[in-house]
Structure formats: structure tokens, C-alpha cells
Amino acid sequence: MMLLSPGRNPAHVKIAYPPGKQHTDKQAPDQKYMVYEDRTNIPLQVQRTPNDGPVEVTLRFVACDDNKCLSPATVKLMFP
């Protein structure tokens, strides 16, 4: 999941998630989500005016294998 810093208008944000592989959770079969293997690029476009300040992007993800998942991780990136 990607989040932008507070105050950003979502109408000015375009996230182009690449096709993933649909996965069904073994513990909760009604839970389906897309998974990505190895490295994945997720293009993000943000329209800004010259007066806009920096944009902070927060990326939350969970790394899993066939048997277990690690604790969720959060990475914050700041773009000037």
C-alpha cells in the first residue's frame, strides 16, 4: 500500500501498479490480493505546482514465502 503525505489531493496522484499474481490467503480463503515476486517497479506520478513543498511517500509491504510472512515493514521516501 502506498500513502502520500497529508494534504495531497488524490486527484493529482497516479499509481500504476503492475500486473501481479493473485493469491488466496490459506488462513482466510475469502482474502485475495496481488503478489509480486523478486523486484517490482511501481510507477508513481504526482502533479505539483511550483509552490508545492516536498512529497513524502509511505510504502507498506509484507515479505512472504510459501510457509510464512515476516512482520509488515514501512519505508518512507521524501521527494523535494
Image (cartoon, rainbow, N blue to C red):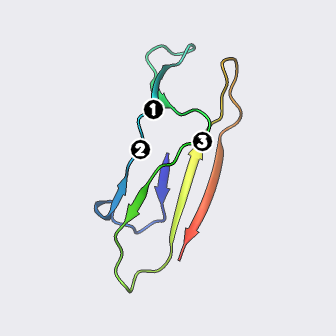
Given the image, on which type of amino acid does mark 1 rest?
A: Gly
Read off the residue under disc 1.
20
**Residue sticking out furthest to the left:** 11
Q: Is mark 3 on a helix, strand or loop?
A: loop
Q: Is mark 2 on a helix, strand or loop?
A: loop
Of pointers 1 and 3, the one earlier in the residue sequence: 1
Residue drawn at (37%, 85%), measured in percent from left and top?
A: 50
Given the image, on which type of amino acid does mark 2 rest?
A: Tyr
Of pointers 3 and 2, the one earlier in the residue sequence: 2
Q: Nearer the viewer, mark 3 or mark 2?
A: 3
Q: Position of residue 77 (x, y in %)?
A: 59, 63
Callout 1: 10 Å neighbours few (<14), some, many (20+)?
A: few
- Left or right: residue 51 versus residue 24 is left
In the image, residue 39 sits, relative to residue 76, either above or below, namely above
Callout 3: 10 Å neighbours few (<14), some, many (20+)?
A: few
Read off the residue under disc 2.
17
Residue drawn at (46%, 80%), measured in percent from left and top?
A: 53
In the image, residue 3 sits, relative to residue 6, either above or below, namely above
In the image, residue 54 sits, relative to residue 19, either above or below, namely below
The Cα–Cα distance between marks 3 and 2, rounded to whole angstroms, is 13 Å
Read off the residue under disc 3.
39
